[in-house]
Image (cartoon, rainbow, N blue to C red):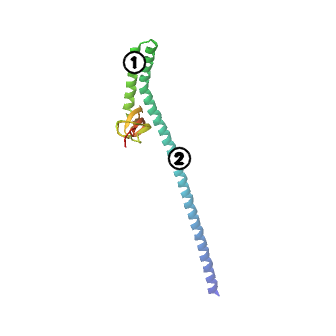
Amino acid sequence: MADERQLQDDTLQKESQVEQSGEDYLAALQAERDEAIDRWKRTAADFDNFRKRATREREEFVTLANERLVKELLPILDDLERALVAATEHQEAALEDGVRLVHRALAGLLERNGLREIETAGAFDPHVHEALLSQPSDAEEGSVIDVVQKGYRLGDRVVRPARVVVAGPQHGSDG
């Protein structure tokens, strides 16, 4: 009987230990979960702060770039105002010289900032040209025969495609 009682006590003690270790294991898992949730929340907050900082820096960069461009445009605005004054005083030669000066200054400024005119000589290229119409011509079919509006690139990007007239098939060909 004593052996049975000892066996029952040992079994109860082992069950209690298993129950205690299961609770410890559950508590460890819960602590690990809480730690992972805390790390996730901190990472999410760090990312949100990074996103806000990057947006703010991008806005500052755009503002500074615009300010630089505006500062470079101000002398051209002054030249244009002088040309308008010459026009009111009926000084045609001075007006023409003023307009040429403004055009040269503006074209130079834009070129220094990476603006390039799109080449229109040769064959039509749909990536940089916009065909307004096709008309019969002695030129090779598909070539640009007239430029209605110049096109420009800023770096590798097309800012405005060149609007062109394209040579079509000749009329009156005897076949």
145 to the left or right of 40: left
Residue 62 vs residue 37, the one in the foreground: 62
Q: Secondary structure at mark 1?
A: helix
In the rendered image, the quadrant that contains the N terminus is: bottom right
Residue 114 in view: no
Q: Residue furthest top?
A: 89
| Secondary structure type for disc 2 | helix
| Image position, residue 108 (x, y; %) | 37, 28
Quarter of the rendering containing residue 20? bottom right
Query: Which of pointers 1 and 2 indicates the residue nearer the eye?
Result: 1
Query: Is residue 110 at all visible to an observer of this figure?
Result: yes
Are there few (<14), some (14-19), or many (20+) residues within 10 Å of tag 1? some
Q: Is residue 146 above or below residue 11?
A: above
* First reached walking from the N terminus: tag 1 or tag 2: 2
Nearest the eye: 114 or 71: 114
Residue 160 in the image: x percent, y percent?
44, 36
Residue 153 coordinates in the image, percent (x, y): 40, 36
Calculate the distance from the C-alpha at mark 1 to the C-alpha at mark 2. 56 Å
Which residue carries the number 1 mark?
A: 96
* Above/below status of 30 relative to 60: below
Q: Amino acid at mark 2?
A: Asp
Disc number at residue 48?
Answer: 2
Q: Position of residue 161 (x, y in %)?
A: 43, 37
Q: Residue furthest bottom?
A: 1
Residue lying at the far front of the rendered structure: 174
